[in-house]
Image (cartoon, coloured by chain):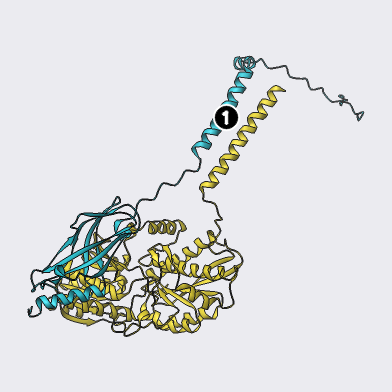
Amino acid sequence: MSGVGPVEPGEHTLVRETPPPRPRGRLALRYERHRRTVLASATVLVALAGGGYLYASRPQPRPAPPPPYPSQAIDLVYVAPVTGPPGAAADGFSFTVLLSVRSGPPVTVTRLTQPYDGLSATSSPAAPFQTKSHSARKIIVTLRVTECEKAPRNPGLPFLDVTLRNARAIEAHSFILGTRYARDLSRTLAVACGNVSR
Amino acid sequence: MRQRSLIAITAALAAGALTLTACGSRDDDGGGSDSGNGGGGTTVVIGVDAPLTGDLSALGLGIKNSADLAAKTANKEKTVEGVTFKVEALDDQGQPSVGQQNATKFVANDKVLGVVGPLNSSVGESMQKVFDTAKLVEVSPANTNPSLTQGVDWQTKKVRPYKSYFRTATTDAIQGPFAAQYVYNDSKKRKVFVIDDKKTYGAGLAATFTQEFKKLGGKVVGTEHINPDTKDFNAVATKVKNSGADVVYYGGEYPQAGPLSKQIKAAGAKIPLVGGDGIYSADFIKLAGASGNGDLATSVGAPVEELPSAKEFVANYKAEGYKEAYEAYGGYSYDSAWAIIEAVKKVVEANDGKLPSDARAKVVDAMQDVSFDGVTGKVSFDEFGDATNKQLTVYAVENGAWGSVKSGTFTG
């Protein structure tokens, strides 16, 4: 106890009268009657709202990235000429390429061709054929000279054109098989069309 | 009292919910600091040399910004623990002599452990020896002349001239023939007029195109060299018109290619102009005007829309708010800078988390074995320092914008 009591009103001071209680409204009266229920309901509502927000904003697993475009998922490399009967034709040249699917879903070759006038191409297996993911298959390509006048003489970096399809897209893509392929193709062209001038 | 405790419980529940919510949203941000200096400790400078002013600045600024983005990303992700990367860029103005001076400046700064650039092959040529003597690695995102990595006699005998030089772009040994194959086989053009700007890049590219076009059976009906300091090509345009050519091949860059295309069409030769990555810029289209529709360019790499990694780069570049576009070499510049970051990482990790005293030489050695999935695909280097990923795309001007027409991959 400090011994200091409430301050009494002195001279020239007025006692502040306690305001009369306000008449309670109907809502307040109803609240008084159902206070427990109201508070319990409010608590439940806040808890539900918080929980719902937490659920809605929970870290979502990232959607799986779309599969790669087929041209970005495969390798197509020149292996070697095919020796023996298929490659022995004077007007043609057979060779093996290796197609590997590095990633993504299976890739289907829907078309395999070469871009030069005067030449035709066939393949074994014939298109369309599918290669599964993380696997490789050998393809034998046979080129035949159909018109020496139109065939290229000595292409430096010849293409092989393929149309590829996977779950992502269909796309045409050229593969430049390199100098060994160029040399082997030029040799064939020289044998088949050696005496033909254009 | 009971009322008070209920209020307190409610408040506590609400506060708890809000706290947990805040935790949840932080997870979504992916964590990490937003600061550009996440690594702390040692500062490593990645130099950038490119034309930051002048005609070619659109490409040069794209190179600088993209390298900067790589450094910021590495700092944010703390890619190399204890190392903060900083980019310092110098302007070579597209001039070999200025590039050489810049190379000397980079060498003198011992914080520089690698340089991204330059744009021009002629500038690259002038810098190589300076960097190699100092054992400072250089990774060009844009030099395409084959002799830089394979020696001047690259067509007969490939010899790597400098161990410290690498590049992420494909060479003109492939780009020229690739263009020739497209022009001959797909566009069915048979008579070409070849023009170049006499520079290392332009003359080299025109030569590799010409050689392949002739091998395929095409005819070269005229050749000309232009002066890159002028924009008046009317005399050449008249020669093109009179030659009967059905296509023009130009070895050079867009500041000259744009007006050249316009003046050739104005002279009455309504034939496409074809060029290499040096003309693959939005500025070419502006300079060539409406008559440039149908002109073609080959450029290094696959189209951006085919590479998910490139899409991420594009989004991050935009988010960073760079004023200039990343242009043709943005992805390659990011990958060049990232290759340096990866090489530094290898060196630091092999030395108990610290940079060794001979860090530059170690970074050159480490670069040879760098391999990662970059913006432009798999990034690694062959025995000459050339990119192992060799993709090219033909683009055509259609309705005032470049659109991809055909892509190819060198697998030889």
Residue found at x 61% / y 66%: B41
Q: Is residue B217 left or right of residue B55?
A: left
Q: Give the image quarter of residue A157.
A: bottom left
Q: Give the image quarter of residue A16.
A: top right
Residue found at x 67% / y 29%: B8
Residue A124 is situated, as x and y percent measured from the top left of the image, at 18, 60
As drawn, B81 above or below A131: below
Question: In the rendered view of the protein, which quadrant contains the N terminus of chain B?
Answer: top right
Q: Nearer the viewer, residue A99 or B88?
A: A99
- Residue B237 visible in this rendered orientation of the protein: no
Residue type (three-letter) at the residue carrying disc 1: Val
Residue B360 is situated, as x and y percent measured from the top left of the image, at 53, 77
Q: Give the image quarter of residue B302.
A: bottom left
| Residue located beneath label 1 in the image | A46
Q: Is residue B260 left or right of residue B335?
A: left
- Residue A67 visible in this rendered orientation of the protein: yes
Quick one: which chain is yellow? B
Colour given to chain A in the rendered image: cyan
Q: Nearer the viewer, residue B18 or A179?
A: A179
Q: Nearer the viewer, residue B4 or A55?
A: A55
Q: Nearer the viewer, residue B84 or B412?
A: B412
As drawn, B222 above or below B83: below
